[in-house]
Amino acid sequence: MISLQLSGRTVVVTGAGQGQGAAEARLLAEAGARVIATDLASEIPEQLAAISSPSVGELVYRQLDVSDADGWQRLADWIRSRGWQVDGLVNNAGITQRSRLLDASVTDLQRVYEVNVAGVLLGIQALSPLMGNGSAIVNVGSVAGLTAHYPVAYTASKWALRGLSQVAAMELGPRGIRVNTVHPGFIETPMTASARPEFRQATLAETPLGRTGTVDEVAGVVLFLLSTLSSFVTGAEIPVDGGQSGHGGAKSVSDAMR
């Protein structure tokens, strides 16, 4: 049956303590999934605690540092000990670093890479053995992975994630596991809240819809990619950016000609 409902399915969401990850966890639980929400905190974060008893599905919290291979293995062992399989994995955890090209250090690149790229690889390696035919992985990229965005460490990590995602779609496809990527634009989250006002204004000027996005708008696309409605979709890259990445800078030219 083709449906957006995830009843009876177990989904792991990383970086679920706040913002976009918390919205994804909430929406997936509302769709009937058993959601294993993970983040760095030892205790369940406040945003998740508020939805710890969803009306339809189930939400449980586990501490996880996505850059820690042993942590991923402990999570896999814990899931296995309960007799659950993993039907979905949302690699949402990510960090940013805003150094410009000539100021960035190799350490900056490595720190962001460990979370945004290596963390995704470790998650796929640890949990794909628990996934069967019909399972799905959604990796959360960024408009920075589709453009020449200025924070070089973050941008490089999201371009690398695209390559990892495509290889995963190819390698896991024969097992019936789909792998897709969503690329949010400027979404109102705790991460983007620290951006300078000039950044916000310039980004809005480059966004055809003329506004920032919401965490629920990203979560809705994640739900679609985990559901049977997308059962023949793999290796796809879906911008959720109000059109920002689609015009290749042409909007500034068009606006200047008015």
Image (tube, grey):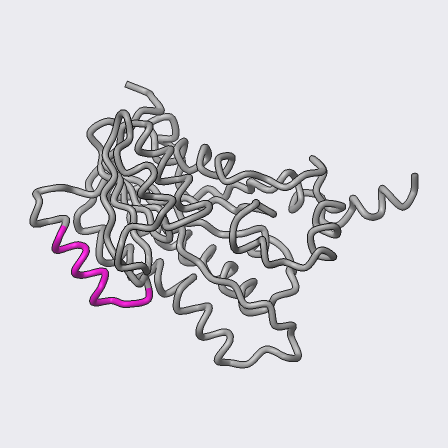
* Helix, strand or loop: magenta stretch: helix
User: What residue appears at the point 7 percent right and 49 percent down from the top-left corner?
Assistant: 81
User: What residue appears at the point 33 percent right and 28 percent down from the top-left corner?
Assistant: 30
200 with respect to 220 (left or right): right
- 153 above or below 236? below
Q: In the rendered image, which quarter contains the C terminus? A: top right
Q: As rendered, which of 25 and 248 lies closer to the eye? A: 25
User: What residue appears at the point 65 percent right and 64 percent down from the top-left corner?
Assistant: 150
Q: Residue placed farthest to the top in the image?
A: 1
Estimate the x, y position of residue 193 in percent, counting from the top left.
58, 53
User: What residue appears at the point 56 percent right and 62 percent down from the top-left corner?
Assistant: 155
161 is within the stretch colored magenta? no
Confirm whether residue 250 shows in the render.
yes
230 with respect to 192 (left or right): left
Q: Residue placed farthest to the right in the image?
A: 258
Query: How many numbered marks are there?
Result: 0
Question: Image quadrant of residue 135?
Answer: top left
Q: In the rendered image, which quarter contains the N terminus? A: top left
Q: As rendered, which of 85 and 202 lies closer to the eye? A: 202
Estimate the x, y position of residue 143 in percent, counting from the top left.
58, 51
- 27 above or below 201? above
55 with respect to 145 (left or right): left
Q: As rendered, which of 258 and 60 lies closer to the eye? A: 60
68 is within the stretch colored magenta? yes
Estimate the x, y position of residue 116 in percent, counting from the top left.
43, 61
Confirm whether residue 170 shows in the render.
no
Estimate the x, y position of residue 86 in percent, counting from the top left.
21, 43
- Magenta region: which residues? 67-78
Question: Image quadrant of residue 134?
Answer: top left
- 80 above or below 150? above
